[in-house]
Structures are given as C-alpha cells and as structure tokens.
Amino acid sequence: GCGGKDPVAQGRAEAFGSQVDITLIGVNRRYAEQVTDTLAEEFTLMDAAWRIDDSGPLARVNALINASSEPFAAPPSLLSVLALAKRLSQESDDLFNPAIGHLTRAWGFTAGSPDCLRPPDPELIAQVLQDRPTMRDVHIDGFRVWSDNQTVRIDLRDIRRGYAIDRAIARLQEFGIHSARISIDGNIRAIGSRDGNPWSHAIRGPDGGGVYATLDIKGNEAAFTAGNYQNAFTWEGELFHDIIDPRTGYPATETASVTVLHPNASTADAAATALFIAGPSDWHRLARQLGVRYVMLTDTQGRVYMNPAMRQRIKLHRANREVIVSEP
C-alpha cells in the first residue's frame, strides 16, 4: 500500500470457445468485479450472436441469404461487424473472406473439435470455387441486408475475437478505465500502461509451443497471430489447418504463422489471416494495402519476414532463424 503502484485486478470470461483474460489497472476490487461481470455478459451475447452453427442471429442471416436474393432486416447485433468484415475483405483482395462458410463447414472447422476430421470431397471444393462467394456479394443498406450470390455463408471466426475485444476496450474507456489488457488465445489489445511501463506480450512459436518472441504493447495497440497450429488435424500424414485459401479451397501452404500489430484488434485479426494466406511472396504488398505497419511472418521453412518497423519493436528468442527485412 505504500509502494505507490496502482492496484491490479485480474478477471476472466468464457467466450468463443476459449478463456478471455481481463487485467485492469488502477481500479478497486469491487468496481473491477462489476466491470468484469459486465464484460463477461457482453462477451456471452456477442458469442451467441456471431456463431455460425444452426442457432442464433448469424445462422438466421445465412438461412435468409441462401433462400433468396431479396433484402431482409438484419439483427442490429450483426450490422456493424458485417459492414466492417465486408470492408476488410475488399481491402485484402478477398483473402480474408468470411463469405466461404460453406467451405469451412465442409472442412469441419466450424463444428468445434478437429478430432476425427478428414478433407472434404474435392467436387464440393470445386463447386464452391466455381460459385466464388465473397463479401462483395453481400449488400448492406441501413438495416437491410441481401446477397447476389446464394452460396454465400458468412463465417466471422477470423474477425469476431478482435471485434469483441475492440468493443470491450471501448466499454472500459466509457467506464473511465484507461489502463487495461484483454487477451484471448494468445491475442491481445492493451491501453495505457502498467505502472508506466509498456505491456509485454509473448508470441508463441510457429509450432504453437514456447515463447518465440516478445513485443511491447505501447499505449493503445493490438497484437494478433494466425498460426497453422491453432486448429488443425492430420490426415494420412499431412497437416490440414483452418486458414483456408479462398482461391484454392485448401489450407494455405507456405506460411507457419503471422503476427500483426495494429491499433485496432478487428483489423489485426482479419489482417493476420489475409497475410497468412498471401504468404512470403505477397504479404508486404497486402500489408501496405491494408494499412498495416507492423508484421512478422514465419514461413514453413523457418524463415522470418518483417518490415523495418516491426524489426525495431520485436525481440526474437530463437536467434538461429534467418530474418528477412523488407522495405518500409
């Protein structure tokens, strides 16, 4: 009590099939519990609204899209995230493509556990590629939504965690809390500082184990990682993960992991997926197009690619890697 340090309060919530960790600085315990309870309730509501299974608002939206090209009134809980997903999908040249939900369902990744999965029938993949569903087919006008392509099935898995964290951080700021951290599955957004020091964020290795690198989160930033270890299965000796390249219908093959640092968690979440798919040869162009300044990509050969801004910020803990620094 005499050290002059701000109190630290830790809280947890369950959402999106994982645990959300909440750290609040300078907040007394009772108020911190009230705030954490409020965030936990909101995470539960967002999780229920954005699930792609057979219940909830998103499932109803997909059913209406698949049934007709006529406009319908979309639930308010979906309108803003759909609009953001559409914009980020277009900015990523549709590599971040939430419209391929039929494809991700065929692979089995929307069902939860990857146990006992196998690749889908190649004919089904070919049919989806022929229909070419993208968020460009989805139109939003006020509260009305419709699609020109009835094979669109919206899957928000690659943006919902970032969007939920952005909303939670906004709520904390409304509550007068200006130093906090929210993290889920190795992804983070933080505001303010911890006793005047940056938040330290550990990044897992491309194999999903150990601390690969550390990154200081300064002021108001989010760090999201997409990796081929996060949701995957092995079939006949080959690894298949859930980051599907919409151009081929199969998991992207050249990248092991991508970490993106950005002020907005939604953008960091979607961009990590898009840059993972873009791979070593095209990540830099796409990062510029998305307005992403900090990127670290590790390919399946173990080579590490970064732009100079990220190289200055990140500390690698496995020094034997080949590091390739791009243009700014």
Image (cartoon, rainbow, N blue to C red):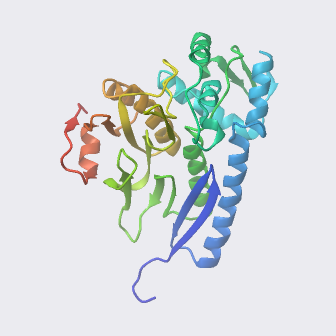
Which residue is at 39% across, 36% downward? 292
Q: Say above or below: 269 vs 98.
A: below
Looking at the image, can residue 215 be seen?
A: no
Which residue is at 61% across, 33% downward? 108
Q: Is residue 307 left or right of residue 181?
A: left
Q: Say above or below: 1 vs 264.
A: below
Quadrant of image for the C terminus: top left
For the residue pair 5 and 316, the one nearer the viewer reads as 316
Q: Residue furthest bottom?
A: 2
Q: Say above or below: 51 vs 246.
A: below
Instruction: Count numbered badges in the picture.
Output: 0
Q: Is residue 96 left or right of residue 29?
A: left
**Quarter of the rendering containing residue 97:** top right
Q: Percent from the top left, x then y, of residue 164? A: 60, 48
Q: Percent from the top left, x then y, of residue 225? A: 43, 44
Q: Residue furthest top?
A: 130
Q: Percent from the top left, x then y, of residue 284? A: 32, 28
Q: Percent from the top left, x then y, of residue 174? A: 62, 59
Which residue is at 66% across, 29% downward? 154
Looking at the image, can residue 15 be seen?
A: yes
**Quarter of the rendering containing residue 9:** bottom right
Q: Is residue 55 left or right of residue 36?
A: right
Q: Is residue 153 left or right of residue 162?
A: right
